[in-house]
Image: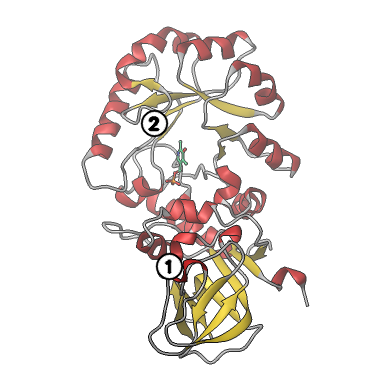
Amino acid sequence: MDSRFSRAWVEVDLDALVANAQTLISRSGKPLLPMVKADGYGLGAVRVCRALQPLKPWAFGVAALSEAEELRAAGIETRILIFTPVLPDQFEDVRRLRVVPTLGQPELIKAWVNSGGGAWHLAIDTGMHRAGIEWWRVNDVVELVRAHPPQGAFTHLHSADANDGSMALQQQRFVDAVGQLPARPATLHVENSPGLERQAPSPWDVVRPGVFLYGVGGGEGSNLSPKPVAHLRARIVELHEVRAGEGVSYGGTWRPPEPRRVATLSVGYGDGYRRAFSNCGYVLLNGKRAPVVGRVTMDMTVIDVTDVPCATGDVATLIGTAGDDQVDINRLSEDASLLAYEVLTGLKLRAPRIYVGADA
Ligand SMILES: *Cc1c(COP(=O)(O)O)cnc(C)c1O
């Protein structure tokens, strides 16, 4: 037996990833700048980039130079933008890796130009106060921009998942800020995944989705829903009878009043199946649903299988689809008061990734 399937694994459906990308291309009418930071949101940046390559992305977005290094080492030649500010002592590596920096501080732009220059994007802050030149301070970079025009300019939306008017306000500030520049940079970009769900077609030149590509999104107020990409599966390693009144797992937080049959799965928070799913998640098993009972531990998770015929070795699905049923990562995370982004990027520790579809 293939040892990758011996305990717990994450199946990554590259066809679903590509389908989600196509959904966003047709919705926005614009090329993608897929965000592949944090190792492709935990699903493997190199495989994600290779699968998306046939869609001719305008660039890939990373957060760390080590991520760009990994993509270049794998032979990916597409343009790469880095969205976390880089400091001057990293400019040499930025150039070596042919990465396009996003700059928003006058001093940093000067340092970039003085160290040899090259393509860069102007980061404009329109209300997030994290990175970039504030929209009301753009005048401070006008002369630099005139002398060394950026290839593009962008802003980042802070609350596009909320229907609070902030997206319109941020875009208005962006329009005003760009209007103060001596010339319109060729490539303007604004929308992240929630922004794309809220606005179509895109009024900008390229779009910058991350999480939707990987199967997270489609919440309230959206008429798009992504196909699930990550499927967490694990095997039953033991079956037990629990007597009435006995407690299951650490702290004995689940204590059935009548005898129950439980199964132990070889997966836990050491694999990214979060402790917050204790007594809250459920799994798909042999065409039925079985609830997680007691606390999720580092290596094992117990489920109540009293109503589900099963045997050791059977495969349970903790996140994603099995047959016609689904554990939706969006719902599961919400029920556990977690952000689906965190759950997704957390699925990367010990469970190996198994790729299916596209170039797998
Ligand atoms: C992460 C990130 C995105 C993508 O955000 P999602 O919500 O995952 O779509 C877009 N732009 C920037 C600058 C980011 O840091």
Given contact means CB atoms under 8 Å apart, are the residues at marks 2 and 1 in contact?
A: no
Q: Position of residue 339 (x, y in %)?
A: 41, 53
The image quadrant where one finds the C terminus is bottom right
Report the label total. 2
Q: Position of residue 315 (x, y in %)?
A: 61, 79
Seen as rendered, the residue at the extreme front is: 245
- Ligand 1 shows up in the quarter that is top left
The image quadrant where one finds the N terminus is bottom right
- Left or right: 313, with 264 as reference point: right
Mark carried by residue 254: none
Q: Considering only vertical position in the picture, is 176 above or below 11?
A: above
Residue on which the image places disc 1: 328
Q: Considering only vertical position in the picture, is 333 above or below 32?
A: below
User: Which residue is found at the position 44% from the left and 42% from the top?
Assistant: 207
Amino acid type assigned to the residue bearing label 2 in the image: Thr
- Left or right: 102, with 176 as reference point: right
Residue on which the image places disc 2: 155
Front residue (pair 224, 203): 224
Q: Earlier in the sequence, mark 2 or mark 1?
A: 2
Foreground tag (2 vs 1): 1
Res 269 visible: yes
